[in-house]
Image: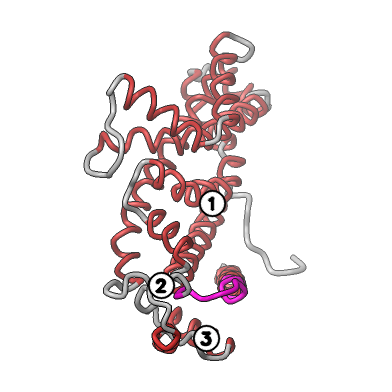
Amino acid sequence: MLRYLLKRLLIMVVTLWIIITLTFVLMVSIPGSPFNSEKSSNEIVQANLERHYNLDEPYYVQYLLYIKSIVTFDFGPSIKQPNQSVNDLLARGFPISFELGIVTIIVAVFSGIILGILAALKHNGFIDYLMMGIAVLGISIPNFILATLLIQQLAVKFSIFPVATWSSPAHMVLPVLALATGPMAIIARLTRSTMLEVLTQDYIKMAKAKGLSPWKITIKHALRNALMPVVTIMGTLLAGILTGTFVIEQIFAIPGMGKYFVESINQRDYPVIMGTTVFYSAFLIFMLFLVDIAYGILDPRIKVHKEGE
C-alpha cells in the first residue's frame, strides 16, 4: 500500500510540474507586456515596472523564480493590485469558491443517486420516464444558460430568490442549482443503469428469496455496487464543477476566485493567473487522489499488489 501511495504521489508531482511549466510557457508566449495599457506611455516608467516584477529577466530566470514562489507558497504581489498579494486574494476568494463547489457536489451526488434509484425501481414506469427526462434536460442545458434562465424567472420575474453577492444561504440556491444540474443528471443516468444491472444479479435474487425487505435489498446490497461507476467518474465531475464555478461566479457576482481569475486574464496579471492556476491544479489533483482511495474503500476486491502477483 505504501508503495502505491508513493507512486501516486510521484505522479501527482510530475503532473503538477507539467501544468506549472505549460502555464509559464503560455504566459511568456503572449506578445506585449502587462504594462502596455498603462496610462503613462513613459518607457522609463514601464521599464522600471518590468524590472520590479522581474519581467526584464531571461525566461529561464523568470521560470526559476516562478518555481521558487510555488515551493515557498509565496506568489508575490499582484501586478494590477500592488497593495494585494496573490496569497491574500487566494485566502479571500478560495473559501467562497470552495463552499460553492462542495455544496454543489453534495447536492449533485445525493439528488442524482436518489433520482437514479427511483428510476431503476420504477423501470419503464412514469417515474422512470420523468426522472430520465429531467436528466436529459440537465445534461442538455449548459450551466451558464441555466443560470441566466434561473435569474430571469426565479429572481427577476417572481423575486423568489435573491441574486448577486454571497451574503446568506438564500444567495446559494440559484448558483448551486445552475452548477449541480448537469452533474446530477449524469449521476442519475449512471446510477439507474448500474442499479438495473445489479438488481438482476443472483445475490439480489437470493436476498429476495430470503424475504428481505425491498428497502434493505436496495440500500444494503444493491446500492454499494451500483455506486462504483459513480465514484469512478467523480474525478471528472469534480473538475467540471471546480472550473464551472468561475463562470457561475461571474454571472452571479460571487466574490470567489472566479472573479480574480477572470480579471487577471483581462488585465494580464501574471502572478494572479499563475498562482490561481497552480493552486487549483494542486487542489484538483489532490481531490482525484482522494477519489482513488475512496474507490478502493468501496470495493474490497480492489487490492494493491506487487507487480507480477
| Residue range of the region highlighted in magenta in the rendering | 22-35
* Labels 1 and 3: the sequence-earlier one: 3
Name the mark nearer the viewer: 1 or 3: 3
Query: What residue sits 47% from the left and 68% below the top?
Result: 268
Mark 2 lies on residue? 38
Visible residue check, residue 13? no
Q: Position of residue 93 (x, y in %)?
A: 33, 58
Callout 3 crowding tier (Cα within 10 Å): few <14, some 14–19, many ≥20 = some
Mark 3 lies on residue? 62
Choose between 73 and 82: the one closer to the eye.
Answer: 82
Q: CA distance from mark 3 to mark 2?
A: 22 Å
Query: What residue sits 38% from the left and 30% below the top?
Result: 151
Mark 1 lies on residue? 239
Choose between 268 and 84: the one closer to the eye.
Answer: 268
Query: What residue sits 44% from the left and 65% below the top?
Result: 267
Question: What's under tag 3, amino acid-wise?
Answer: Gln
